[in-house]
Amino acid sequence: MLFNILIAGILLGSIYALVTIGYSMVYGILKLMNFAHGDVYIFGTLFCFTLLSKYHLNAVIAVVISAIMGGVLASAVEFFAYRRLRAAQHRMISMITALGAAYIIQNCSELEWGSQVLPFPSLIPAQFIEVFGHQISTTQIITLMVAVGFIVLFNLFLKYHKMGKAILCVSEDINTSRLMGIPINLIISIVYFLGGVLGVIGGILYSASFNAISLGMGFRGTIIAFTAAVIGGIGSMNGALIGGMILGISENIIAVYVSSTYRDTLTFLILIIVLLIKPSGIMGKGDYEKV
Amino acid sequence: MALPEAKKLKLVLFAAVFIVAIGLPFILRDPYYLGFVNVFIMYSILSLGLNLILGYTGLLSLGHAAFFGLGGYTTAILMKNHGLPFVPSLVISALIALFFGFLVGIPTRKVKGDYFCLLTIIFGEIFRLVVQSWIGFTGGAMGIVGIPIPKIFGWTIRTEADFYFLGLGLLCFTYFTLAILVKSKFGRAFVAIREDELAASVMGVNAPVYKILAFGIGCLYAGLAGSYLAVYQTVVTPSNFRLEESCFMIIAVIVGGMGNLGATFSGVFLMTLATEVFRPIAEYRMLIIGLIMVIVLLFRPQGLFGASAFKD
């Protein structure tokens, strides 16, 4: 029993980590709470749903197209709603336009797909195999492998590719990077694009393993991503991984052993405890106030 | 007695507003328009309280609807299940909102900026989830129906006009107490914290205490507005207190102008008017609210009547 819960928790955690990485990266660069993140990835996932159920596209092609859609939408939000305000007097302003963008996307998705729960097709055939005397479905294993694979790939991209290095530089110090000749606007667009892509892949994996997709998951996704990012330490890749895992595993344990009605409430309490003990998160470096 | 010219003008203006406010229900005979005014009054009370938190002290709270809801549910439960009269329910609702405001405000000592904003979102979500799940106490998603008609010292509040005067009384209380507060030593301390918390602490302002105070007091007015909503609607449901409501108030404060009490009214008026005008196309409501948020802030980040520029 506990073994299966842990497996399900790790699976959910890896999906959360995928969604969180995009979120955390954007925050790390612009220090902006991207409220539109959840709605962007739900839009991409719903788009994938239409491609699969209406046009019966090949699963891989559908996923690729909708991931690119999500990425383009995310960078469009950045371009229209945030870019002009980057020099605004207060960051609060761009946070509010982020919320406004989230509302616009959410409303457009609602007009197209409605707000009910839709049956998302399972992309991976489910077979049960036995590991150490426990039944595990192949869906879980493949989902986990895809999620972890993307996380590893992304980390390698950041470390070894020129563009990835540029992203790390910009998140370290945006002004110095500009002086060193890094095209800031392009890099920020790319970061948003990649965040959207990873988010949509996470959303599709989530919907495919639970066979359900609904608009309401968008806002919850934003909150979950932010929560996981803060628990792990915002702006840190490893932190996003750890935060996502903590949330995924604890959610499953709480739902089974404590109460499934109050699952989200108790998950949020974990965040409050982390914030009170170490506001910069588990892997966070801690902010120093400059005088 | 010779009064300065500016002061005389202010007095005349004030008297005019007062007369119009008293006479309004006799001019607007149509309950539809009066209902609109009542909703405007309720959101004004909420947004004025939020302006103290957001505009004067610089704390971004996305959980204001939860305090609104605390007031609403407290009044509903006290009046319906315990048979308490309206006035004590109103006072207790405000005090409960104040208490929870202080409770949420306490972490501001350590939790700052965006993290505090996240904390308020989480508080709002926890409130909504608990209210939705605790069916025995709060009625779950159906909410509490059939809240009794309020009476104040023999005055039965039943028609739109009655509710208008009740609301007007609450609004006057809110506006004048806040106007006195922001001009006092406390108000100056709040603004000092907003402008530069470190500098304020160096000057001897006990920043954590003042931040908790500002947050709690702002929430007290949300409790009042919640109590008003409960008796006005005679129903409270979790959907009255969603995150969208918090956003609505924030936009009202920002569009009006942060750190300016009078300007809040213009923001609230614009927002309630937009909601009312676009009611026939309700499925586009969020799209329109989103567009207002983005467009107004892109072109006028300091709001229509911004008091002073924020700095980072």
Image (spheres, coloured by chain):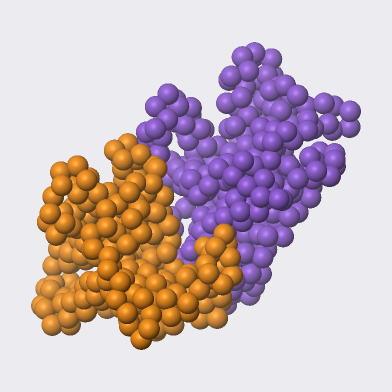
In the picture provided, is B198 more to the left or to the right than B96? left
Q: Position of residue A152 (x, y in %)?
A: 21, 79
Residue placed most toward the observer, B229 or A80: B229
A11 w.r.t. A282: above or below:
above
Residue A275 appears in the figure: no
In the picture provided, is B225 more to the left or to the right than A7? right
Q: Position of residue B111 (x, y in %)?
A: 53, 72
Residue placed most toward the observer, A125 or A108: A125
Q: Residue at x 39, y 27 (%)?
A: B281
User: The chain shown in orange is which?
Assistant: A
Task: Give the quadrant of residue A291.
Answer: bottom left
Q: Position of residue B159 (x, y in %)?
A: 72, 21
Task: Give the quadrant of residue A66.
Answer: bottom left
Q: Residue at x 85, y 42 (%)?
A: B84
Residue A8 appears in the figure: yes
Q: Colour of chain B?
A: purple
Residue placed most toward the observer, A38 or A57: A57
Q: Residue at x 51, y 32 (%)?
A: B272
Q: Residue at x 57, y 62 (%)?
A: A262
Residue placed most toward the observer, B78 or A27: B78
B193 w.r.t. B254: above or below:
below
What is the tally of numbered marks visible in this picture?
0
Q: Position of residue A220 (x, y in %)?
A: 43, 57
In the picture provided, is A3 more to the left or to the right than A260? left
Toward the bottom, the furthest residue is A132
A170 w.r.t. B14: above or below:
below
